[in-house]
Image (cartoon, rainbow, N blue to C red):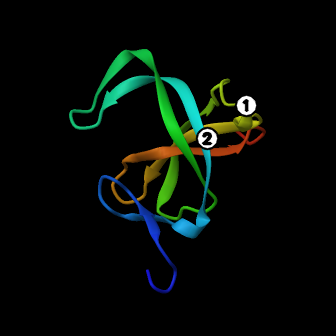
Amino acid sequence: VEEHGSVYVCSFCNFAVSLAKNAKDNGRTLTANKPVIDGYDMTQTWDKFQQKFDALEISAAGGAVAEGHWEPTPSSASWLSGVSQRMAICRNCGFQLGWRYEPAGNPHE
């Protein structure tokens, strides 16, 4: 920490995800209709509910990996136009940390 500075860690396993200097907080929020998932019992509802997320942009996160199929971004977030999203999970334990955004023109899996 003394050499590289503070780090963001996975809230589930405390694994280092990114250096704090790679993060940019614009005070943005993201509202999306998502199914509710219980992280303890791993149960999921079929109905989708509106959820609000605080958005933090991280330019490099070696402790995270993108997983799953591409999805369109929520239309309520105009600042995300032109990109697609996949889940970003902890490289150590697989806990979902957020989403990874890449240009919409990339090939979809």
Residue closer to the observer: 14 or 2 = 2
Which one is earlier in the sequence, the residue at label 2 or at label 1?
Answer: 2
In the current view of this chain or complex, which residue is farthest to the bottom? 3
Answer left or right for 51 relative to 11.
right
In the current view of this chain or complex, which residue is farthest to the top? 47
Determine the residue positioned at 72% across, 40% down: 107
Going by the numbered disc 1, the residue's amino acid type is Ser
Q: Position of residue 64 (x, y in %)?
A: 48, 57
Tell which tag, 2 or 1, sits nearer the viewer: 2
Going by the numbered disc 2, the residue's amino acid type is Arg
In the rendered image, which quarter contains the C terminus?
Answer: top right
Helix, strand or loop at mark 1 = helix
In the rendered image, which quarter contains the N terminus?
Answer: bottom left
Q: Position of residue 4 (x, y in %)?
A: 52, 80
Residue under label 1: 78
Determine the residue positioned at 50% across, 36% down: 53
Residue 48, placed above or below residue 54: above
Residue under label 2: 28
Q: Position of residue 82 (x, y in %)?
A: 77, 36
Q: CA distance from mark 2 to mark 1?
A: 11 Å
Residue 54, placed above or below residue 21: above
Badge 2 local density, few (<14 within 10 Å), some, or many (20+)?
few
Quadrant assignment, res 90: bottom left
Answer left or right for 90 relative to 55.
left
Helix, strand or loop at mark 2 = strand
Q: Position of residue 87 (x, y in %)?
A: 51, 41
Answer left or right for 95 relative to 56.
left
In the current view of this chain or complex, which residue is farthest to the left? 41
Image disc number at residue 32 = none
- Would residue 109 be seen by someone viewing this image from the given angle? no
Determine the residue positioned at 21% across, 33% down: 41
Badge 1 local density, few (<14 within 10 Å), some, or many (20+)?
few
